[in-house]
Image (cartoon, helix red, strand yellow):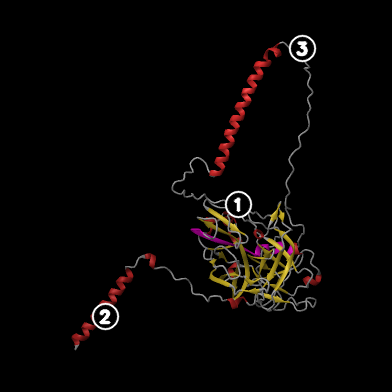
Amino acid sequence: MVSVKLLAFVARMTLLTGIYSELVSLPAARLSRHPRLMARATASDLDNVKAGVLVKDGTQTSCALGLLDNKASLISADCLDFSNGSVDKSVTYEAYINAGWDGVSSKYTVANITVHPNYDERTKANNIALIQFNTNSNISWYNYNAVIRHDWSNLVYVQYSLSDIVSMKWNTPTLYSEDNVDDTQCGSFSPVYNESSADYVCSKDTITTVPSGVDAPCRIVYGMVYGEIDGSMYPAGFLSHVAVKGGNSLCSFTDQRAYYTLISDYLMFATTALNREVYYYSKDNVTEPQQNPYYAMEVPSSAAPSGVTNIGGNIYAKQAAETPAAETPVETPVGESHEDSGLSSKTKIIIGVCSALGGLILLAAVLLLVRWWRKHGKIRQQRDPYKETTAQEILAGDLGGASVPNLRPSRVAATTTDPLIAAYERPPPAYRADENPDSGVDPQSPLSPHPLLGADASSDEKR
């Protein structure tokens, strides 16, 4: 009996020793730290936030709205069309806003557009514009925007889209949640990120599928990023551009990074342009977003590294390169040679015929000239040059200089004063509904937001 128990014990020990040996012998690449477990955000978590997309000339775009309230929004300047350095006013821009917390979808025609004066289309620095709509109504709701990044437990990337523009039917938002940390390779893809990394959220894992009701040639990226604070999601930023390596679109590439402009540094820009208050949320009730209305990112000398292409604006329709990428060799079919030139066969034939005709005409002209010379040479030699008119009148005129091209304004016209920050005791929802805007709000009320006040805000607005 003892020997049987001893044999069983030895067998168990041998098995455990073998398992331990296999674990120890595993290669290091397989022993990676498991990411921190987190509660994944769901579409229902977005029910308490108003959001929207930009529509241009009746066509839906991928451009997400960084909504401030029901009258204004920040947006990527790349989403606008420009003509001679100014926004093309022939284009009809509309803001489509989802049902959010009140269950009411709406659409408004954009009335005013203010592009950040330091927006640089080439590098994507300060890729910001303010659009205004619904300007004749009283403010009835506004979003609390997340402004302090260390408050956010997670980042949540969201893509909003309409399945039917006419009926304003919205798709269920697609979203992706990850830790509040930028990808380590973001700097190698974008010079503007290297200059102003604190102004962006950057991620690799942002590629998603094209939603229903949208005509797009290939994959897209999420349009918005939210900061998750104590289980609630607050708008934090919107897509600036995607840096694609090994291609010039999202249809074919080897690697990519998506860059989202944070709203926080441009709230004072919006406040000054609007000349009224906008709202934000910081968890400690003390920390504020930066207060300079003329804040601007540094513009790098280079738009993108070699082999990397920047793609901005409407991703649905704009798959072409914004920044020249490294040329991709074109494979020549068997039996064809492109060594002489890049001209087509038709063009070569036309050039050959024209060259032959030109040669014949030139030869005929030379023969006629020789015959004329032989006939009139002796007569010309007998003419007295002193009897010829030798005076010649010389005319001269001034040359005009080049005109200076149109320039954008270098500063926002309005000025600002120090903002009044209203305090409150507990976190608000990500939105604020003002049923009676004229009633005034007690600044010590738990639902009173952090306002940022414009320079000429009335006493009623400051309440």
Which quadrant holds the C terminus? bottom right
Q: What amino acid is found at the position of numbered circle 3 in the picture?
A: Tyr
Tell me if residue 365 comes above or below residue 6 in the rendering. Answer: above
Q: Earlier in the sequence, mark 3 or mark 1?
A: 1
Asked if residue 258 lies in the magenta stretch, the reply is yes
Asked which quadrant contains residue 132, the reply is bottom right
Closest to the observer, 355 or 137? 355
Name the quadrant containing residue 163: bottom right
Can residue 288 be seen here? no
The secondary structure type at the circle numbered 2 is helix
How far from the left and from the top, in percent, is residue 104?
A: 69, 77
- Which residue is denoted by mark 2 in the rendering? 12
The numbered dot on residue 284 is none
Return the x and y of residue 420 as percentages of the image width and height. Answer: 74, 68
Q: Residue at the spot x=62%, y=24% of the render? A: 366
For the point 78% across and 33% down, the residue is 398
> Of the residues tagged 2 and 1, which is closer to the observer?
1
2 or 1: tag closer to the N-terminus = 2
Q: Which residue is mark 1?
A: 300
Spatial separation of the CA atoms under disc 2 and disc 3: 129 Å
Going by the numbered disc 2, the residue's amino acid type is: Arg
Classify residue 450 by image quadrant.
bottom right
CA gap between label 3 and label 1 equals: 70 Å
